[in-house]
Amino acid sequence: METEDDLTGVEAQRLSPKPETEAIGGRKLKPATLMMGHGYDPMLSEGSLKPPVFLTSTFAFPNAAAGQRHFEGVTGKRPGGAEGLVYSRFNGPNQEILEDRLGIWEGAEDALAFSSGMSAIATLFLALVKPGDTIVHSGPLYAATETLIGRVLGKFGVKWLDFPAGATREEIDAVMKEAATGNVALIYLESPANPTNALVDVEAVAASRDAVFADAAEKPPIAIDNTFLGPLWSQPLRHGADLVVYSLTKYAGGHSDLVAGGVLGSKERINVIRAMRNTIGTICDPNTAWMLLRSLETLELRMSRAGENAAKVCSYLRDHAKVERVGYLGFLADGEDRQADIYRRHCTGGGSTFSLYLKGGEAEAFRFLDALKIAKLAVSLGGTETLASHPAGMTHLSVADERKQALGITDNLVRISIGVEDADDLIADMEQALAAI
Ligand SMILES: Cc1ncc(COP(=O)(O)O)c(C=O)c1O
């Protein structure tokens, strides 16, 4: 008689995909819940609870007709796009699951994963902009993005016009109208601006775009770099942006052990960027995608904890005798000015990266940085560990003095990204480092 242990004679059943649960009793499941399984059915991978890393450069077609049908989709000969996977420069199982899960956080229809934040931005620009076009952008932008627009796209005849990140509707209108004398292909924002922390009024930018281009056949899309506050504390698709860009190296990766990027938006807009990514191969690799899937499971936990820690550390620093000023977005919550108004409309938290202006100059900043025992001296942000850096001497060293002054990048400025350590331990570290100045 057959026992449970003796199954040698039993033919294995073919496993079929299980339908996904995205709602229970009319309750739509939250992103934090969906991160554990969305887009992946263990039964298609031998029951493996977690997705395997699919290391393959190409995918087998079941028959020749299916192969032809696939390429008809890829090349646009047949509407509806490609079905299934064909070649790893285009996509792979790990990246597809990652893209499904990334989109969930902002309610985006579709998403794309990239090999870095910069390759995401470069692919977006290449897909949307041609020689002679103008990019309207908020300023300042992440330095490499400014380089990409000014020095790289500029070389190919792309023009640009910018408005300051904190600009009013009137100021945005003025720049938009000036740009509209040419062909505006893209409006590109970054909020908060690094390192000024100025927030962009995305609703005002969208209203300005809609008014200035009311009669245009096609309005230029608004893309925004949401690396600093997304996806937990800011979701710009809800405020009028069409595309959201991420350096997933930061909070999404979250452990300072990978480099990746993402773009989110409607299927229609994402497909245009996908075609460029397929051509140039800026997709992330399967292993990085797998690591990101693991990180996304704890994204809300990590960001919540880092945000709470930052609020506590900043409250402590604000009243310290050796501190001139703390540039922390969370302090805007009770403010009266325009930035506070934008904060209340656009943000649900102050993030975990802030500017600390010490009393004194470079010597004081360096003494503080060198005395830190828990916080590591490194650029980047959004990792589990607290990082501190000196923008004037590090990330912005090559920026001209007048521009540094205009951006508030002074010698006494220290940038801090708070991690998920114990908040009181971090405060103790700041306290002893301030004492050492
Ligand atoms: C706001 C912002 N955008 C884009 C990037 C570029 O991302 P990556 O380093 O992943 O290419 C960074 C990197 O620091 C960033 O801070």
Image (tube, grey):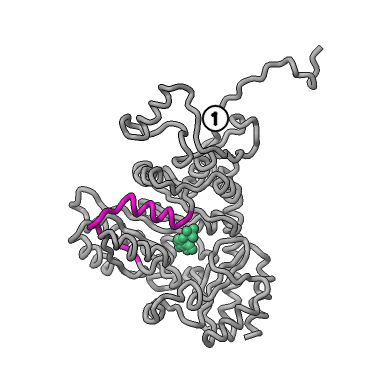
Can you give x and y, in whole percent of width and height, for residue 14 in the image? 61, 21
Crowding at dot 1, Cα within 10 Å, few <14 / some 14-19 / many 20+, comes out as few
Q: Quadrant of the C terminus?
A: bottom right
Find out whether residue 134 is within the magenta segment.
Answer: yes
User: Which residue is pictured at 41% across the width and 75% down the height?
Assistant: 399
State whether residue 268 is above or below residue 407.
above
Count every numbered label the image shows and give the total: 1
| Left or right for 156, reference 21 | left
State whether residue 361 is above or below residue 306.
below
Find out whether residue 58 is within the magenta segment.
Answer: no
| Left or right for 281, reference 368 | left
State whether residue 322 is above or below residue 380.
below
Q: Quadrant of the N terminus?
A: top right
- Mark 1: amino acid: Pro
Magenta segment range?
116-138
User: Which residue is pictured at 56% across the width and 68% down the height?
Assistant: 417
- In the rendered image, which quarter is residue 396 located in? bottom left
Q: Is residue 84 something that shows in the picture?
A: yes
| Left or right for 96, reference 184 | right
* Residue to which mark 1 is pinned: 19
Q: Who is closer to the viewer here, 383 or 426?
A: 383
Secondary structure category for the residue under label 1: loop
State whether residue 274 is above or below residue 336.
above
Can you give x and y, in whole percent of width and height, for residue 349 in the image? 51, 62
Q: Who is closer to the viewer here, 39 or 156?
A: 156
User: Which residue is pictured at 56% across the width and 78% down the height?
Assistant: 318
Q: Who is closer to the viewer here, 153 or 377?
A: 153
| Left or right for 146, reference 58 | left
- In the rendered image, which quarter is residue 372 located in? bottom right
